[in-house]
Image (cartoon, helix red, strand yellow):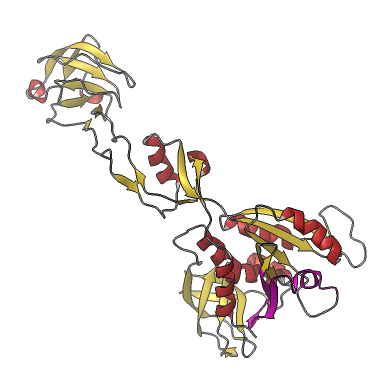
């Protein structure tokens, strides 16, 4: 059987880096910046008031209380103001440009709030409540480096600097294919032998959670001709075809029958759940085939597919965070296979993890309750309660 590490490497090599694209700032949340961002302007672009109050010369309010004539009114957004004459004040709003001649702002709470004249009850030092031009960012400096993940603060900075669009690594495009003649959609009545389709919904959501784009192609029957007729025209523009089911050793394995010998190789990976896997290229598009049991499909995505997608989009961190935890109950694992059991992590109780459900690859409810995967190495067959294990967080 193929090792977990070898199959991870194979999948990683299949999905190449995505191209840089320019997207509106509002569409860049969670994406990776493709180029250094250099400030075209300074922040602030001019000296401005940090308070609602009065622009003054600090020397004129050194001895208080003092009453000064108010010679101008400066709202935010005003393009220009008259210079401040000695012995006078100008009423000013937060963010408005500080007039020439002023070197401080007295906040309105320290005055009587007058409009024609103002009594100042507390003095200020030179520079008080004045935001100097370029105090935050100087024009021409690199404010964000290529490779940073764009969050709300980074997008706010870009917008403040006047960027309407940003160069980012585009999202990886994944065609998620759900096969099986036994599958029906939600709301339909189940006939004998039928089940509701879930893998496509789950895997498409997993692709989006990882940062990619997912197109879901559902209810492809177990027929090779129908499979190719559905898939071939949908491949245009895709970076990866991701399938679930139809890859085992039995009859009616439509994915295997349709893709074997056409650029996709199938193997058994030394992992539980999720042994039957496939990878390669079909009609020039990268292909990863996952088992059909829902837990096998989702665990396989976490272990093999998600890191490759994240790397393709340039994320600096592609793996889920991990921790070392103590088992609070014993478990067994098959010899020669890396096992990923579902678990609940409890940091409050001293980094303890509780297995959720058994090892069965059909136990979807246990997966839904889990917040981590418990990794059991291939050379370990038994672990006692209290044994230390590595957990891979799912959230």
Residue 196 seen in the current view: no
Q: Where is residue 33 drawn, in percent x and y?
A: 44, 50
Q: Where is residue 247 drawn, in percent x and y?
A: 75, 74
Tell me which corner region of the image, top left, top right, bottom left or bottom right, holds residue 43: top left
Q: Residue at x 59, y 67 (%)?
A: 14
Q: Report if residue 276 lies within the magenta region.
A: yes
Tell me which corner region of the image, top left, top right, bottom left or bottom right, holds residue 367: bottom right
Q: Residue at x 81, y 70 (%)?
A: 254
Q: Where is residue 316 drawn, in percent x and y?
A: 44, 61
Tell me which corner region of the image, top left, top right, bottom left or bottom right, holds residue 252: bottom right
Q: Report if residue 358 lies within the magenta region.
A: no
Judged from this view, the residue extending furthest toward the right is 192
Left or right of 389 in this view: 189: right
**Which image quarter is the N terminus in?**
bottom right
**Which image quarter is the C terminus in?**
bottom right
Q: Nearer the viewer, residue 153 or 387?
A: 153
Left or right of 45 in this view: 384: right
Q: Nearer the viewer, residue 246 or 52?
A: 246
Rendered position, 103 above or below 373: above
Left or right of 292 in this view: 167: left
Q: Residue at x 56, y 55 (%)?
A: 211
Residue 237 seen in the current view: yes
For the image, the number of numbered tags is: 0
Rendered position, 392 above or below 185: below
Magenta range is 252-280
Rendered position, 360 above or below 173: below
Q: Where is residue 4 drawn, in percent x and y?
A: 58, 79
């Amino acid at each position: 059987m193929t090792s977990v590490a070898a199959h991870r490497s194979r999948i990683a090599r299949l999905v190449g880096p995505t191209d840089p694209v320019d997207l509106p700032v509002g569409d860049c949340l969670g994406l990776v910046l493709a180029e250094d961002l250099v400030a075209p302007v300074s922040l602030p672009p001019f000296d401005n008031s940090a308070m609602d109050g009065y622009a003054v010369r600090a020397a004129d309010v050194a001895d208080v209380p003092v009453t000064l004539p108010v010679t101008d009114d400066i709202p935010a957004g005003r393009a220009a103001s008259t210079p401040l004459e000695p012995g006078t004040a100008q009423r000013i709003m937060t963010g408005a440009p500080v007039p020439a001649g002023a070197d401080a702002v007295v906040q309105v709470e320290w005055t009587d709030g007058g409009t024609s004249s103002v009594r100042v009850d507390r003095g200020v030092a030179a520079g008080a409540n004045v935001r100097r031009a370029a105090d935050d960012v100087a024009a021409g400096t690199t404010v964000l480096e290529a490779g940073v993940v764009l969050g709300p603060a980074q997008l706010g900075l870009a917008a403040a600097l006047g960027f309407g669009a940003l160069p980012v690594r585009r999202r990886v495009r994944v065609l998620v294919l759900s096969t099986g003649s036994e599958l029906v959609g939600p709301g339909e009545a189940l006939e004998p032998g039928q089940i509701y389709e879930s893998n496509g919904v789950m895997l498409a959501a997993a692709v989006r959670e990882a940062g990619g784009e997912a197109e879901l192609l559902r209810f492809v029957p177990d027929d090779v001709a129908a499979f190719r007729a559905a898939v071939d025209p949908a491949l245009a523009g895709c970076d990866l075809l991701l399938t679930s089911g139809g890859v085992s050793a039995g009859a009616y394995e439509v994915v295997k029958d349709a893709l074997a010998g056409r650029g996709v190789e199938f193997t058994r990976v030394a992992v539980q759940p999720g042994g039957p896997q496939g990878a390669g290229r079909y009609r020039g598009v990268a292909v990863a085939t996952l088992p059909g049991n829902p837990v096998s499909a989702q665990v396989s995505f976490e272990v093999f597919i998600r890191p490759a997608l994240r790397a393709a989009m340039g994320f600096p961190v592609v793996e889920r965070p991990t921790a070392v935890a103590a088992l609070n109950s014993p478990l067994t694992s098959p010899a020669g296979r890396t096992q990923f059991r579902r678990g609940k992590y409890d940091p409050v109780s001293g980094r303890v993890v509780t297995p959720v459900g058994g090892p069965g690859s059909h136990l979807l409810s246990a997966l839904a309750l889990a917040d981590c995967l418990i990794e059991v190495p291939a050379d370990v067959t038994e672990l006692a309660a209290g044994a230390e294990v590595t957990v891979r967080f799912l959230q």
